[in-house]
Image: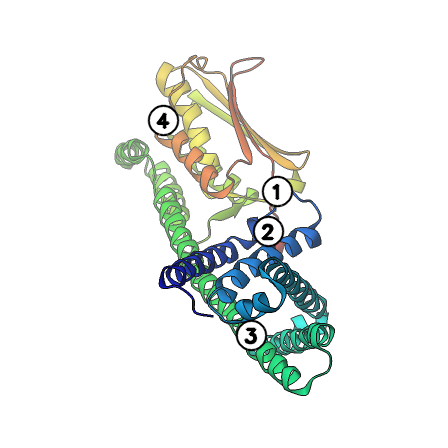
């Protein structure tokens, strides 16, 4: 039967459109029929839809449909072709699902796994094609041979497409993982650089005042000048952080905070008193380096230095719930309602944001006593010290 040119043109265009639609549906396969809760039913419906699109794209440009139409009529030929396609797709896909669920198959290498999957697709396709051929034509050798060859080539092509798509996806994930690892590494370097910068910061006003005090004491009291110089050296040695650790133990932080308070005590003598109380159980938990000293320095700055009056500072550290509670109380002027963190306190916020993001809370309280309250709701043990 001679097919008019215009009909051939329409068939070719229609076939291209259906092939394009089939490829698009494959790319969004996992998002098809999302309203269906049953995963098995949803995936089978998606497979059948894709199979129908491929069928319309391939059958339209082959002579098979026209031969069948000449024998059985267009409607019967079309219905039979649709039924065969649905049956083949359903059988082959579920054979694939069955094999794919075997744990030992999943553990195979990429090549062996896909070899097994392709073999499964080919054998299941040949089996169902043979059954359909026998039902339609009986066991005729010529037609059976043609059917087996047709099913072998089609199933092999489908299996290779599946393997190729998986390889492309695997390669994409590998490259994505490499990029994510690189981004993670760069973020870690950025965080380390920020922490190094924060930990190397010592309030320049404190350094200036301490050096001036040492210069004055060198003339009037050499013993105190020496003691203050050694304490200042210890404080700066701690700030240099030779070990490159982002954390220090509570015990180490207390020691360095006490060194700072000794320096201020030498400067201000009887105008400054302090006490430090820490639960022994808290000694080996970790804190960001140089987090206590800025809080204590804030109390000295806004208490003694601002008023010139006798200042008492009390630092307490205790375990509370799953975290650590740190309070720095003093008898200086009350915190203003609109508090703007200064140089030291801002560094505390920055370190906590980097090392304990979303796991801390700082409060500036005036009642019942004036104090800074820091609660870190996550405890990290210094394992080597235990």
- Disc 2/disc 1 C-alpha distance (Å): 10 Å
Label pair 4/3, CB-CB below 8 angstroms = no
Labels 1, 3: front one: 3
> Residue extending furthest front?
1
Determine whether the residue tagged by mark 3 lies in a helix, strand or loop: helix
Q: Note whether 293 is above or below 81 in the view shown.
A: above
Q: What is the basis of the colouring in this image? A: rainbow
Residue that numbered label 2 is attached to: 382
Q: Position of residue 77 (x, y in %)?
A: 61, 63
- Residue topped by disc 1: 379
Q: Nearer the viewer, residue 193 or 166?
A: 166
Numbered badge on residue 154: 3
Q: Residues within 10 Å of mark 2 (few under 14, many from 20)?
A: some
Left or right: residue 93 compared with residue 288: right
User: Which of 111/257 is in front?
Assistant: 111
Helix, strand or loop under label 1: loop
Q: Where is residue 268 drawn, in percent x and y? A: 38, 25
Residue 342's disc is: 4
Q: Residue at x 69, y 45 (%)?
A: 37
Q: Is residue 361 left or right of residue 212?
A: right
Mark toward the start of the polypeptide (4 vs 1)? 4
Q: Nearer the viewer, mark 2 or mark 3?
A: 3
Element type at mark 4: loop
Image quadrant assignment for residue 94 = bottom right
Which is more N-terminal, label 3 or label 2? Answer: 3
Q: Earlier in the sequence, mark 2 or mark 4?
A: 4
Is residue 291 shown above or below 161? above
Res 119 visible: yes
Name the N-terminal-most of marks 4 and 3. 3
Mark 1 or mark 3: name the one nearer the start of the chain.
Answer: 3
Expressed as whole percent of the image width and height from the top left, the position of residue 113 reads: 61, 75
Mark 2–mark 4 Cα distance, whole angstroms, equals 30 Å
């Amino acid at each position: 039967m001679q097919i008019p040119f215009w009909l051939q043109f329409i068939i070719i265009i229609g076939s291209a459109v259906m092939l394009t639609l089939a490829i698009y549906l494959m790319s969004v396969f996992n998002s098809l029929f999302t309203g269906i809760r049953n995963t098995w039913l949803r995936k089978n419906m998606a497979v059948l839809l894709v199979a129908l699109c491929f069928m319309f794209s391939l059958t339209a440009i082959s002579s098979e449909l026209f031969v069948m139409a000449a024998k059985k009529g267009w409607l019967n030929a079309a219905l039979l072709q649709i039924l065969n396609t649905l049956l083949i797709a359903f059988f082959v896909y579920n054979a694939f699902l069955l094999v794919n669920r075997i744990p030992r198959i999943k553990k195979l290498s990429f090549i062996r796994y896909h070899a097994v999957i392709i073999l499964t697709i080919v054998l299941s396709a040949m089996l169902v094609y043979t059954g359909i051929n026998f039902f339609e034509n009986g066991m005729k050798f010529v037609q059976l041979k043609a059917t087996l060859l047709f099913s072998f080539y089609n199933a092999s092509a489908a299996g290779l497409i599946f393997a190729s798509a998986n390889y492309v996806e695997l390669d994409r994930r590998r490259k994505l993982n490499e990029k994510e690892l690189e981004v993670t590494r760069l973020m870690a370097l950025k965080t380390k650089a920020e922490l190094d910068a924060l930990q190397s910061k010592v309030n320049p006003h404190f350094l200036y005042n301490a050096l001036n005090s040492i210069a004055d004491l060198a003339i009037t009291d050499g013993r105190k000048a020496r003691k203050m110089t050694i304490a200042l050296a210890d404080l700066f040695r701690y700030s240099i952080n030779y070990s490159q650790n982002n954390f220090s133990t509570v015990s180490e932080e207390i020691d360095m905070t006490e060194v700072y308070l000794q320096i201020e005590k030498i400067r201000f003598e009887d105008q400054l008193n302090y006490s430090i109380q820490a639960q022994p159980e808290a000694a080996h938990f970790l804190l960001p380096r140089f987090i206590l000293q800025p809080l204590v320095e804030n109390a000295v700055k806004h208490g003694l230095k601002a008023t010139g009056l006798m200042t008492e500072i009390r630092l307490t550290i205790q375990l509370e719930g799953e975290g650590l509670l740190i309070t720095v109380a003093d008898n200086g002027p009350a915190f203003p309602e609109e508090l703007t963190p200064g140089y030291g306190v801002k560094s505390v916020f920055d370190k906590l944001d980097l090392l304990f993001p979303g796991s801390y809370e700082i409060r500036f309280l005036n009642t019942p006593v004036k104090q800074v309250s820091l609660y870190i709701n996550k405890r990290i043990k210094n394992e080597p010290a235990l």
